[in-house]
Image (cartoon, rainbow, N blue to C red):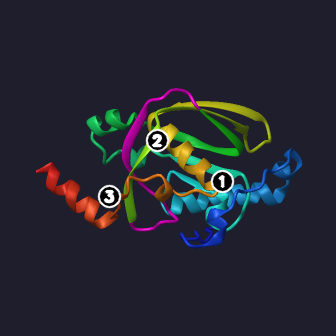
Amino acid sequence: MILNIVQTGDPVLRRVSRDLTTEEVKRHTIQQLIESMRDTMRAAPGVGLAAPQIGESLQLAVIEDRAEYLKHASRDELKERDRSPIDFHVIINPKISLLDDSSAYFFEGCLSVEGFQAIVPRAYTVRVDCLNERAEPVTINAQGWYARILQHEIDHLNGKLYIDRMQSGTFTTTENLLRLLKRSDH
């Protein structure tokens, strides 16, 4: 089922979400929510979706960076962003650790701030300790674009949006960004 994605200004996006118990994670309602979130993320399309974005204040996010999303990027772009496909997975009750001081600066958008993008500095390497969709403990070590996605989704679970971290002078409509990028290709 495709769910509605709430937009900036909705109070649920500014709340710290509550943890889920292992019993809750295993319940049919949460498993169904995960499926609906996956379908909603894919339909958007997006590379991540946090529960607050569909109005649920829960420490739960789905992530997937499909190969088809990367086919329009040049080899240089993929290398610069350290971006490769990421299989679908779920993070629940995540705790993030930044593993070094290095940062990457790239344009970032959000399904809850539709039609806009800005440059957002993010840690290059992170570790996330969380539960998976079976309520099993998992540790994720990520770098590059995958680390960016994790930080973006975990921010949602903590009541933050990328606009809180962006370089404000770079805030632009997606349309203007595409026009600018097209000009720089020539």
Is residue 112 part of the magenta span, yes or no? yes
Q: Measured from the top left, where is residue 74 in percent x and y?
A: 27, 41
Quarter of the figure with residue 58: bottom right
| Residue type (three-letter) at the residue carrying disc 3 | Gly
Measure the alpha-carbon separation of dots 1 and 2.
16 Å
N-terminal of the two: label 1 or label 2? 2
* Residue behind mark 1: 157
| Residue type (three-letter) at the residue carrying disc 1 | Leu
- SS at mark 2? strand
* Residue behind mark 2: 122
Which class describes the residues within 10 Å of circle 2: few (<14), some (14-19), or many (20+)? many
| Residue drawn 58% across the image and 69% down it | 5
Q: Measured from the top left, where is residue 51 in percent x and y?
A: 67, 59
- The dot on residue 169 is 3
Q: Nearer the viewer, residue 163 or 44?
A: 163
N-terminal of the two: label 1 or label 3? 1
- SS at mark 3? helix
Measure the alpha-carbon separation of dots 1 and 3.
26 Å
Contact between labelled residues 3 and 1, with CB atoms less than 8 Å apart: no
